[in-house]
Image: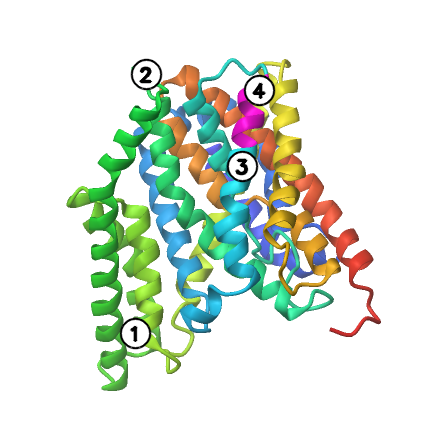
Amino acid sequence: MLPLLIAAAAALAWAVTHRRLSSLAVTGPMLMVAVGLVTGWVAGRDVDVFFNSSGALQTSELILALLLFINAIQFRSPLRAQLAGPAIRLLAIALPLSLVLITMAGALLPMGLSFGVVLVIACIAVPADYSKDLVRTRGGRVPGRVSRWLTIEGGYNDGLLSPVLLVAITLAAPGTGDAAHDVLGILLGAVPAIVLAVLVGLATGAVCGILLKVAYEKQWADVQSARIGVFALPILSYTIAVTVHGNGFIAAFVCGIAYRLVQGRNRIPSDAHLVEDMGSFLNLLLWLGFGAAAAILLSHNDDWWPAIVLALIAVTVGRAAPVLLSLIGSKTSRTDRVYMAAIGPKGPASIVFALIAFSMLPREQGYPILAATAIVMLSSLLVHGIGGPFLTRRLYPADSVH
């Protein structure tokens, strides 16, 4: 009961001090990680039992489905407008280049891990998250155009990487070779699951979206009941997809896109408030759990220098070089390019990816993945959480005009 008590108390502490902490450049994830580190020392055994339980996998998968759905519904502009210009360059060029670069760096470092495990770590280290609790890209000094491009990248990158993660986990499983034909066979075997997921997501999002919209317009439903219906959508699409042997993550993500498209401009007022608030709450709990896990994992071994080097590569050159290359020839300014290359905070999707990999792989592979993730996330909190505000002030002075 002690971890539950600490979690509730930490969430309440964040709720009553949120604005004050923000003014001091202390984010929610920073606070929850600090509390989690203490929790890991005090209740280490209980936390370890949780990570080794079957409930951890199911919980983390549902949380990721919810987060992917939230990312998909948050955009108001048409899909064609979103996937244009620098945003599509970040997703189509920078993202795969980052994945390749970090994987190559991990393979060259003396970590003693297979290619599949290194690829899993790369999938965990690549996704960026631009939620307001991690870095301030919306409002204030950052130009609206840059905020829009980064928000689109953060909204889609974890959805695009989730099938790659599952392929990487399959490669990392015992008895799987690293040959190219094995990779091709795994990719071909994943195609039916992806197709089923897309169909389930489209059908669930479109049908339920129209149903909710009609019900609200005919006053069969009110705003509160519509919010509950929207909250149920990612759970419904994920569950249906898994039942028919599809990819539940892709289904939840596509469901969010389909729902947003059928809603159009005349969306139900504040329809996403409940699902977004629940997402924020689960986000805090994930950071708390991450802090507890980091305290346990990093205290059991002090030979982490290869993972530290990989983490530094992931949050610096592993992000900066691909982004700068992808923006060559674009109409973005030099300042905007430098800012987007330097800012790439890691968020809850990376934590959930790590939990999924840990739950699906043997412990001799799962623990190094969790440990590497802990170092990557802590490095990101320090580099982006502390350095981000300084970089913003440096590149976008208060008297500049956007």
The residue singled out by tag 1 in the image is 262
| Label 1, label 3: how far apart the Cα atoms are | 33 Å
Report if residue 288 is visible in the image.
no
| Secondary element at image label 4 | helix
Instruction: List the residue tagged with mark 2.
Output: 174
- Rendered view: 290 above or below 95: above
Q: Which secondary structure, mark 3?
A: helix
Label 1 Cα neighbours within 10 Å, binned few <14 / some 14-19 / many ≥20: some
Mark 3 vs mark 4, foreground winner is 4
Between the residue at mark 3 and the residue at mark 4, the CA separation in whole angstroms equals: 16 Å
Residue corresponding to mark 3: 125
Assign a secondary structure to mark 1.
helix
Asked if marks 1 and 3 touch (Cβ < 8 Å), the reply is no
Residue extending furthest front? 329
| 4 or 2: tag closer to the N-terminus | 4
Name the image quarter holding the N terminus. top left
In three-dimensional space, the C-alpha distance between marks 2 and 1, rounded to whole angstroms, equals 44 Å
Q: How is the image coloured?
A: rainbow
